[in-house]
Image: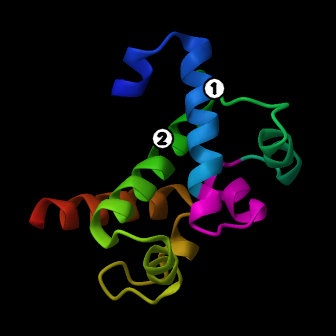
Amino acid sequence: MSALSMALAPENASDVLTKAVTRAAERLGLPQSTLAKVLGVSASTVTRLYGGKYKLERHRKEWEFALLFVRVFRSLDSIVGDEKTARRWLASENTGLNGRPIDLIGHTEGLVRVVHYLDAARGRI
């Protein structure tokens, strides 16, 4: 269980993670359709998420994907330090990942690979 999950009451954790995911996506310039792929939900669900009519819930699979996506954002933020460089990194071909991170994060295996890659890079800093 993550620190976020343990530190907050269920309803507060839901609010916090929902807001964190939408803000991270906005700061990284991710279209809502890409965020839908990352979370494994429909485009209409993401529209409701942005509109405040849908919240992420712990018992759903998108909760885990959201936690991983926020980790990607936080790792990139700590490594590169600015949104423009983070966006460029996501869109660039990465030989270590054998693909563009933006394409990889839309699939479970790719999202996990990107998280591990960034965790390893942060460990070197």
Q: Residue at x 45, y 74 (%)?
A: 86
Q: Amino acid at mark 1?
A: Asp
Q: Quadrant of the C terminus?
A: bottom left
Q: Secondary structure at mark 2?
A: helix
Q: Is residue 33 magenta?
A: yes
Label located before the other in sequence (1 or 2): 1
Q: Please provide percent x and percent y for residue 65.
A: 54, 44
Tell me how many marks there are.
Answer: 2
Q: Quadrant of the N terminus?
A: top left
Say which residue label 1 marks: 15
Q: Is residue 100 above or below residue 119?
A: below
Q: State whether residue 113 appears in this view.
A: no
Q: Is residue 2 above or below residue 88?
A: above
> 122 left or right of 16?
left
Q: What's the distance in space between the residues labelled 1 and 2, CA to CA?
A: 13 Å
Q: Secondary structure at mark 1?
A: helix
Q: Residue at x 45, y 57 (%)?
A: 73
> Looking at the image, which residue sits at the far left?
124
- Tell me which segment is drawn in magenta: 25-40
Say which residue label 2 marks: 67
Q: Is residue 49 above or below residue 124?
A: above
> 96 left or right of 41?
left
Q: State whether residue 44 appears in this view.
A: yes
Q: Residue 113 sits in which quadrant?
A: bottom left
Q: Please provide percent x and percent y for residue 115.
A: 36, 58
For residue 92, the mark is none
Q: Residues within 10 Å of mark 2 (few under 14, many from 20)?
A: some
Q: Amino acid at mark 2?
A: Leu
